[in-house]
Amino acid sequence: MAFKTIFEPFRIKMVEPISVSTEAEREVYLKKAHYNPFLLDSEQVMIDFLTDSGTSAMSAAQWGGMMVGDESYAGAISWHNMEKEVQDLTGYQYILPTHQGRAGERILYGHLGGKGKVFISNTHFDTTRANIEFSGAVAIDIPVEEAKNPMLDHPFKGNMDVVQLDALIQKHGTENIGAVILTVTNNSGGGQPVSMKNAKAVSEICKKHNVLFILDCCRVAENAYFIRHREEEYAQNNYREIAQEMFSLADGAVMSAKKDALVNMGGFLALKDKSLADACKNLLIITEGFATYGGLSGRDMEALAIGLKEVFDEDYLHYRIRSTTYLGEKLKAIGVPIMWPVGGHAVYVDAKQFYPNIPIDEYPGQVLVGELYLKGGIRSVEIGSLMFGKYDEQHHLVPANWELVRLAIPRRVYTQSHIEYVIEVFAELMKSRDRKNGYRITEEPQFLRHFTCKLEPVNA
Ligand code: F0G
């Protein structure tokens, strides 16, 4: 379409009211939540950018599918619909349903991992790393050099450093490599895409050394959009074909269907090799469920099969990526420091630059998260020293590499007016960038502290 306005390729049949609050009310809510938006109730939030995971709006066709979901324990029609769809998309024969992405990760990486094993990725997502490390294995991230500079313009900052990949495989020995995992798009690296050229290079190296190559494919459709628009050879391909080609390069895939399968819950493991699939199937049955439902309801599998088709729709993907980019471009234009270029599912704000006067050990990212909520009822998440910071022996904070705030955009949920509203809230926050004080932590658990820790403002 030649027009500039982002045309949302859907109309709304059913609405979910948003409870509109005042700043004074939100002040009370945030204080009660100990300045940690994970502790807010969703009713207290006006725009929820906490995650794009499991927050999609399903289509009428998906809701229709829910009604005909077959809830049989074994051999349900809905399972066959899902299996067929995933086989067709991935080209892999063995499909294992799981309740979400991390269940597939636990099964596959638990089986392949263990002490002495090494996994290599462009960037392991938190749960991927946690499952690998829990098995006793080591997870190594090797993003390309360009990925390390948040402001550098580069079309494929999600790429893996293939020179390092080859060297690492040789260093550790092929027999010790659990798997090479390519995360598309690279969530922890800012939702940045991986090029087909890079995926091909990774595939060749893995074949050369005979090591397993797995795709973490939860945003594979969004990644396909970037390939078509940034990699010339693919300008004429449709998005599904691009994704299929990427799958053909790997030996298997793990998917959190809560992203690009447009469902609220679900996932799968898809594998080429029968003996690996058989081993995983045993583990699936022990902890997830029988091989034809794996922890999912029949209706969920039905919706997943439909969502996996819908996500490759030309107009949908255009709207999806354009609207994320639109938010990023507008924020950049009013001077908000953001990670560049804008990724597929989220805009990342550099909070260290946004609040240059707030010391890192007072968590500038969390301040921005708090202010977005207070001013606009917008919930976001800090990806910085609150999430990844550690302490040294003197209990001083060892900061994370970045102080980012992620605005993750749910699929098909918010309209352009909501996005304009978010931009307006940012414009308001731009007026108080000279803040000097942040937060201190008053209570924290030992692991994954950002979820449940309590904070309070440091007063001047
Ligand atoms: N891999 C990637 C790249 C992810 O982004 C996620 C989840 C998972 C695996 C795990 O999937 O949640 O279904 O178990 N990401 C969410 C997020 C939580 O907010 O980015 P899951």
Image: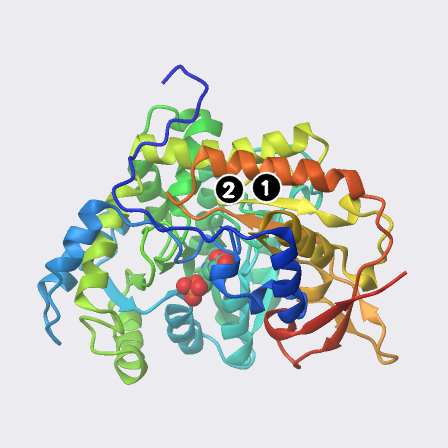
Residue furthest toward the top? 2
**Residue 208 position in % (x across, y down):** 45, 54
**Residue 62 position in % (x across, y down):** 21, 50
Which residue is labeled 1 in the image? 157
Q: Is residue 243 above or below residue 178?
A: above
Residue pictured at 39% horizontal, 24% vertical: 235
Q: Is residue 220 above or below residue 394?
A: above
**Residue 321 position in % (x across, y down):** 45, 35
Relative depth, front residue between 223 and 70: 70
Secondary element under disc 1, as helix, strand or loop, is loop
Asked whether the beta carbons under mark 1 and mark 2 sit within 8 Å of each other, the answer is yes
Relative depth, front residue between 147 and 49: 49
Relative depth, front residue between 209 and 432: 432
The disc label shown at residue 255, or none: none
Secondary element under disc 2, as helix, strand or loop, is loop
Residue pictured at 36% horizontal, 49% vertical: 260
Horizontal side, residue 304 vs residue 154: left or right: left
